[in-house]
Image (cartoon, rainbow, N blue to C red):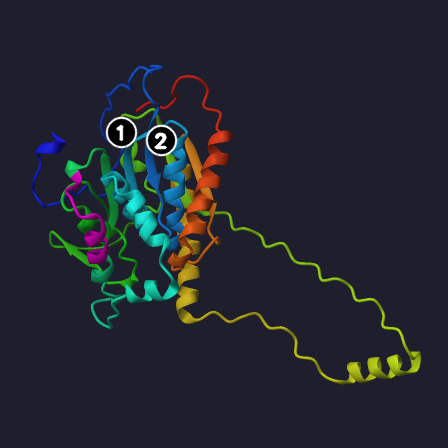
Amino acid sequence: MRGLQHTLVPTYRDDPDPFDEAMTDALPTPSPDRKPTIALALGAGGAKGLAHIGVIREIEAQGFEIVAIAGSSMGALIGGIHAMGKLDVYADWVSALARLDVLRLVDWTFSGGGLIKGEKIIETLRALVGDTLIEELPLTFTAVATDLDRGREVWLSRGSLFDAIRASIAIPTVFRPYTLDGRRLIDGALLNPVPVTPLIREVADYLVAVSVDGPAMVATPVEMPVEAPRGGNGYRQRIGDFIGRMIPHNEARPAVPSAFELLTQSMDLMQANLSRLRLAAYEPDLLIQLPRNMASAYEFYRASELIERGHEQAREALANWHRGGAPVRNP
């Protein structure tokens, strides 16, 4: 029984196959007296993952009950805090952060395999919302991490919630790997950016996935107004045009990204492609996608804007979701 487990040793499931044994749990019979239930997979994406807050709020506002969550990286953080019932507390706090506040949460280091220790942010969050054992949460929760030495996906479903979150958010070269139960764990997004697979056996009416690695927004070029020809002496105008042609003009050059920006963009691109492949293999009932270039992975000071974008995207996706009458997903 979930509520009777009190050990701090996490449950590991390596390279799990959701179809390796018979799945016999039946879905509950739909009833007009109960809310339709959802198992929710929340994808990785750094600050972009703040949009998950808006998605969760919109799903619940439309009458669904979230009964299980699996998350990678930022998805694990948002999903775990929601499972604790403290999402509003976190949302208010992160929405008040300015750029300087974000920098104050960074504990820089130049050893241990990462630029950031990660202890300061985790302790700040523990002080803000507390900590608990995953098995004592009111809903099923799984944080996905990667075992660096064994090269395997790991599902953390027992033990300290923030230990599991810290392991799942350990972005390579950015955060130090997190040692848990003798294993060096790093970002779950390396192998499973949008973790649908931990939820396939969950007894829920629908399985919904949220990816912040969707197709990039295309910026619409701004058309500059054409200046009307200047009046005046035509001779002077011709002289001015001649001189203008003689003076060399520097052509606009594209901005050169820093090494860190290039690394971030490259990882985002790989993650987006891996997400697409995994979601094609394990298709959810509903996929809510947000554009991968809506923010950088570190723009946490844009929280209010990103939360609202999550609201809008979820509202649109749910409005266009033709799920019919009874639930259609079977375990």
Q: CA distance from mark 1 to mark 2?
A: 9 Å
Q: Position of residue 152 (x, y in %)?
A: 24, 49
Disc ID at residue 202: 1
Report the disc number at residue 46: none
Q: Residue at x 26, y 70 (%)?
A: 108
Image height of 85 relative to 306, above or below: above
Q: Mark 2 is on which residue type?
A: Leu
Mark 1: which amino acid? Glu
SS assignment for the magenta stretch, majority:
helix
Structural crowding at the residue carrying mark 1, measured as other residues with C-alpha within 10 Å and reported as few (<14), some (14–19) or many (≥20): many
Spot occupied by residue 145 in the image (x, y as percentages of width and height): 25, 49
Start-end of magenta stretch: 122-134
Answer left or right for 291 relative to 282.
Answer: right
Tell whether 29 sits left or right of 221.
Answer: left
Q: Magenta span has 132?
A: yes
Please indicate whether residue 164 sits to the left or right of residue 269 in the image: left
- SS at mark 2 in the image: strand
Query: Where is residue 230 drawn, in percent x and y?
Result: 85, 72
Residue behind mark 2 = 207
Q: Residue at x 22, y 48 (%)?
A: 129
